[in-house]
């Protein structure tokens, strides 16, 4: 325990990386999910099958496998590019690899959240906007997107808390977030119990904060609904 | 049925009170059912009919009063705490006082036969083969022998209620409680359930029936009890209560039905 | 990616071995998770205030910890505690990576399944429970024969989701040297100096496995919910009917 104490700030500091990686990845996933959902609502004949296949595939693959695929895939692509264009191979950023891998994968979950949200909205609201003479683009940006986002908030907040936990997998390809740092400390102090206990506490604090935030969010939502 | 006065009292309620928070749903209800009585309980919505019936088998714990079954006293006070001392007695009381619910409450994961067998195997500890035979007989009695293998979701409301009656009969209760057994049914299904209940009445079974079927109260009941505001307002023979009574609340209540007719 | 490796029997033979381990990890940790989760759900719903809050704390903690950290904690951290290094517990669970994975996944599944089962219990209709009491069943029998079976059916699709989640999450066993589907794919990749091809093959098997499980769940859901032949209708206003 004594050997671990000096490393406490180092491990806890990893939370910043955990949260940053989760935020960027989450933004990716939301963008993909929203775009795919809006594409489906245009009624384009290819949209339905493509999005459904995308959801089915990425819902079934382990996150870890996706991370490896992206990581090794990029590595090979970069090597080939380096050979043919004659530059020295640059290492792949684990941050980028995780963002891409988990972003694309969680995009599939967010498609489900958004399309459920879209379905829950009274279609009369869109018709009213069209009837007002708004252009289709304006109906999308000023009516559809805000309404869908609002209806998707509970699902998305849930997705984000899952994202925070999944980000621990990024440690496997070297992203220095909480898990990775705990592992490094465990290796050098020979006190794995203490090092991982710190990591556990870090995530429990996050979970507690998320639970409080969610409760407050729900309460404020209920009060606006009732108003 | 005229000799019901001389038959012994089987189920008696004495001063049953029940309050939900500050609201007094029952304000001291007394009632005695003799063996073979068919007591129709009528009254406006919210008058406490269901609550009273549920107090009789302690699905609702009364706040005060006693239920006396065949001489054995079950006092509200015995069951008020979390004590387990009287639990065995409660189970016995419930076996001897059956209840049929407004919304059937069949168990969706059991077939009609399975629903009826449950009480036989689990309460009477009957071996499965014997229970199956007995359950089949009971289904036959309510006219559903051919539906033994159906799940509740595959039965009409009237059929579900008849299975529920067979399930209640399985433990051979001495008193049957019915809480608006036909109110959840489509009008065309009411008859089949009422005729089963009527047949049970003819067997001389003791029954308390909360009902809005005034015709049933008039034709089948031996006694009618009118409840309002958590208390019994009128009681007597169907003729006395339904035709002769001068009580303004009862007259107003009955006139609603006359108009509907 | 190399086509010759992709179509080689060696690759498929070895990752199919990995698939067996993945299935074993999933089945065992779902079974243990369901047992513990059901117990937690029962305590949560029927237990005393104290017991219920202990169960709630368990659920909060194990839902809050990333599975990988839990696994590291149990695999690397727990052996530091001396009493865990002796006896049956050590032999069965902590001494092997596989045993530790089962433990970690089961503890994690229990937390999620407890919430699912609790939801299932809370959606059992009050009247169906009362009907059990009304015929004279004991509380224990009402719970075991009526409430729980109905609750399990109510949350079947959530149990299915959790199974799929476990199939995917079990891939982290590869990090602590278990040769599950992903682990085996990486192992083959290292031998042939080709990381991508075995991963793609493993991806296909994960897809197939999840599809099969999804179909099984849907089939079970339908098999357990008998199609209504004629539905019961909602309550009608008081009707006056003369007994014939
Ligand atoms: N569980 C409960 N909690 C609080 N109040 C209750 C509860 N059950 C019944 N009540 C109240 O007790 C009163 C009597 O209700 P009860 O259901 O017994 O009436 P009822 O005569 O059966 O009416 P109906 O004809 O509509 O079935 C009502 O005012 C009701 O609101
Ligand atoms: Mg009622």
Image (cartoon, rainbow, N blue to C red):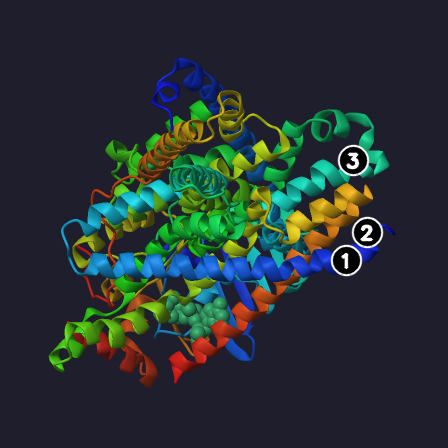
- Residue position for label 1: A8
Residue A29 place in picture, x, y as percent: 40, 57
Tell me the number on the disc at residue C79.
3
Q: Crowdedness of circle 2 by 10 Å Cα count: few (<14), some, many (20+)?
A: many
Residue at position x 28%, y 63% in the image: A118
3 or 1: mark nearer the eye: 1
Q: Chain of mark 3?
A: C
Q: Ligand 2 appears in which quadrant?
A: bottom left
On the question of residue B78 being in view, the answer is no
Q: Residue beneath label 2, please?
A: A4
Where disc 2 sits, the SS reads loop
Horizontal arrangement in the rendering, residue B254 relative to residue A159 (left or right): left
Chain ID at mark 1: A
Give the camera-side residue of B201 and A1. A1
Give the image location of residue B235, x and y in percent: 39, 71
Looking at the rendered structure, the number of numbered marks drawn on it comes to 3
Q: Residue B7: give its label.
A: none
């Amino acid at each position: 325990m004594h050997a671990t104490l000096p490393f406490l700030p180092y491990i806890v500091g990893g939370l910043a990386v955990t949260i940053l990686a989760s935020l960027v990845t989450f933004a990716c996933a939301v963008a993909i999910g929203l775009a795919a959902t809006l594409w489906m609502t245009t009624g384009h004949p290819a949209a339905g099958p493509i999005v459904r296949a995308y959801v089915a595939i990425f819902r079934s693959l382990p996150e870890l496998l996706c991370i490896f695929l992206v990581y090794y895939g990029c590595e090979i692509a970069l090597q080939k590019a380096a050979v043919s264009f004659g530059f020295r191979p640059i290492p792949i950023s684990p941050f980028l690899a995780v963002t891409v891998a988990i972003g694309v994968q969680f995009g599939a979950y967010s498609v489900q959240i958004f399309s459920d949200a879209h379905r829950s909205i009274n279609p009369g609201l869109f018709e009213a906007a069209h009837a007002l003479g708004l252009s289709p683009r304006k109906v999308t940006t000023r009516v559809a997107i805000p309404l869908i986002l609002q209806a998707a908030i509970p699902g998305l907040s849930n997705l984000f808390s899952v994202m925070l936990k999944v980000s621990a997998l990024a440690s496997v390809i070297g992203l220095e977030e909480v898990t990775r740092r705990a592992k490094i400390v465990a290796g050098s102090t020979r006190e794995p119990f203490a090092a991982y206990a710190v990591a556990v506490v870090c995530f429990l604090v996050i979970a507690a904060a998320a639970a409080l935030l969610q409760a407050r969010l729900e309460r404020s939502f209920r009060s606006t609904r009732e108003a | 049925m005229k000799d019901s006065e001389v038959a012994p009292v089987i189920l008696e309620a004495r001063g049953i009170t029940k309050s939900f928070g500050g609201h007094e749903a029952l304000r001291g209800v007394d009632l005695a059912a003799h063996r073979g009585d068919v007591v129709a309980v009528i009254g406006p919505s919210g008058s406490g009919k269901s609550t009273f019936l549920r107090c009789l088998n302690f699905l609702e714990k009364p706040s005060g009063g006693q239920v006396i079954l065949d001489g054995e006293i079950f006092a509200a006070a015995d069951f008020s705490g979390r004590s387990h001392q009287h639990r065995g007695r409660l189970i016995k009381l419930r076996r001897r006082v059956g209840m049929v619910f407004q919304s059937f409450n069949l168990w969706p994961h059991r077939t009609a036969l399975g629903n009826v067998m449950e009480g036989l195997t689990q309460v009477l500890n009957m071996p499965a083969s014997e229970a199956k035979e007995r359950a089949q007989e009971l289904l036959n009695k309510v006219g559903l022998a051919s539906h033994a293998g159906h799940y509740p979701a595959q039965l009409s409301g009237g059929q579900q209620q008849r299975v529920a009656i067979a399930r209640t009969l399985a433990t051979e209760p001495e008193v049957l409680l019915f809480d608006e057994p036909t109110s959840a049914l489509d009008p065309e299904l009411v008859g089949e359930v009422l005729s089963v209940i009527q047949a049970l009445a003819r067997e001389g079974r003791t029954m308390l029936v909360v009902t809005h079927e005034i015709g049933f109260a008039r034709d089948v009941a031996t006694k009618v009890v009118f409840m309002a505001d958590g208390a019994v307002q009128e009681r007597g023979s169907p003729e006395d209560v339904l035709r002769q009574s001068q009580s303004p609340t009862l007259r107003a209540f009955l006139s609603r039905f006359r108009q509907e007719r | 990616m190399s086509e010759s490796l992709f179509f080689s029997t060696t690759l498929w033979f070895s990752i199919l071995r990995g698939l067996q381990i993945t299935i074993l990890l999933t089945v065992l940790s779902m079974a243990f998770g369901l047992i513990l989760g059901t117990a937690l759900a029962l305590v949560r719903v029927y237990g005393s205030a104290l017991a219920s809050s202990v169960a709630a704390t368990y659920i909060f903690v194990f839902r809050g910890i990333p599975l990988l950290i839990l696994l590291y904690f149990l695999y690397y951290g727990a052996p530091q505690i001396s009493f865990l290094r002796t006896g049956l517990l050590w032999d069965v669970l902590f001494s092997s990576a596989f045993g530790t994975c089962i433990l970690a996944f089961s503890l994690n599944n229990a937390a999620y399944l407890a919430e699912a089962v609790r939801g299932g219990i809370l959606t059992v209709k009050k009247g169906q429970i009362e009907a059990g009491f009304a015929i004279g069943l004991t509380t224990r029998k009402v719970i075991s024969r009526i409430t729980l079976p109905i609750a399990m059916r109510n949350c079947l699709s959530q149990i299915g989701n959790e199974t799929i989640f476990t199939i995917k999450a079990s891939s982290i066993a590869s990090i602590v040297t278990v040769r599950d589907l992903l682990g085996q794919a990486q192992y083959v990749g290292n031998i042939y100096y080709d990381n991508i091809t075995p991963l793609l093959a493993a991806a296909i098997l994960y897809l197939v496995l999840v599809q099969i499980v999804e179909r099984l769940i849907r089939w079970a859901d339908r098999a357990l919910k008998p199609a209504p032949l004629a539905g019961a209708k909602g309550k009608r206003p008081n009707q006056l009917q003369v007994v014939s």
